[in-house]
Image (cartoon, rainbow, N blue to C red):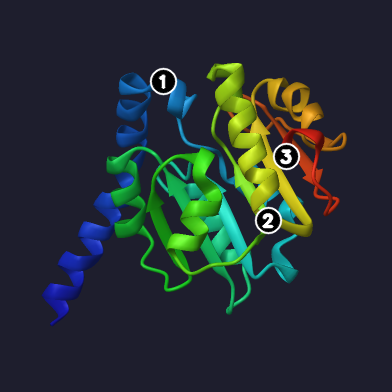
Amino acid sequence: MASQRSLSHSASKRTIGDAPVLFFRSFLERPKEVGSIIPSSRFLERRVARTAALRDARIVVELGPGTGGTTQALLRALRPDARLLAIEINPRLAERVRKRLPDPRLIVHCGSAAEIARALAANGLGAADVVISGIPFSTMSRNLALEILCSVRAALSPGGRFVAYQVRDRVAVLAREVFAPPTVALEVRNVPPMRVYRFESSGTASPRLR
């Protein structure tokens, strides 16, 4: 039994240790989807979790969990009865998150961030209290970025929050058509430094969503 536990622990450490390699490989294969060559720092992960104010959230959506570092920080901050739906377009990364984080509150959905409502419905979940995104809006076409932002807005419950951590400010520029102006903080203890935006849902549809 002791040897089996040791082997299991070693396998778990190997899975986590291989995460930066997988992240870098995924960046080389699909740079427009990953957007960075290394995972987020623990400082950025904690700031994102604080900015999202997860204590009162029951349904949270994460767009682009990557290898699961931020996902793990979100799970630490979530209440016991909450659910976290992580939507990842890269099948290999989605499978890595499933294996790395066997938390009953976590649902990993392989699909597009432009179909949040469909992913919520497919997993028996209602409107999201919070949507968190690390996907790189600066590398997307304008049409796709707006489609995702509208998908976020439509998926949020009244008073919900959208938190996006980004290297550049393009998400804030594009979101003017969908959300009210955000609050923004800069996390310099990350490579590269990241802007963390928080948008509030007013509960009324924007002109693009009517």
Q: Position of residue 181 (x, y in %)?
A: 87, 34
Q: How far apart are marks 2 and 3 (CA)?
A: 19 Å
- The residue that label 3 is drawn on is 209
| Label at residue 31 | 1
Mark 3 touches mark 1? (CB < 8 Å): no
Q: Distance between the residues labelled 1 and 2?
A: 26 Å
**Precedes in sequence: disc 2 or disc 3:** 2
Residue 18 in view, yes or no: no
- The residue that label 2 is drawn on is 130
Instruction: Tell me the quarter of the picture where residue 77 sits.
Output: bottom right
Q: What residue type is labelled 1?
A: Pro
Give the vertical position of 2 relative to 17 (above or below). Answer: below
- Whether residue 52 sits left or right of residue 137 in the image: it is right
Q: In which quarter of the image is the C terminus?
A: top right
Q: Distance between the residues labelled 3 and 1?
A: 30 Å
**Precedes in sequence: disc 3 or disc 1:** 1
- Whether residue 7 sits left or right of residue 16 in the image: it is left
Q: Position of residue 14 (x, y in %)?
A: 25, 50
Q: What residue type is labelled 3?
A: Leu
**Precedes in sequence: disc 1 or disc 2:** 1
Q: Which of 185 and 162 is in front in this view?
A: 162
Q: What residue type is labelled 2?
A: Val
Q: Nearer the viewer, residue 158 or 51?
A: 158
Mark 2 touches mark 3? (CB < 8 Å): no
- The residue depicted at 60 percent of the width and 41 percent of the height is 133
Q: Position of residue 82 (x, y in %)?
A: 59, 72
Q: Nearer the viewer, mark 2 or mark 3?
A: 3
- Whether residue 116 sits left or right of residue 100 in the image: it is right
Residue 152 in view, yes or no: yes
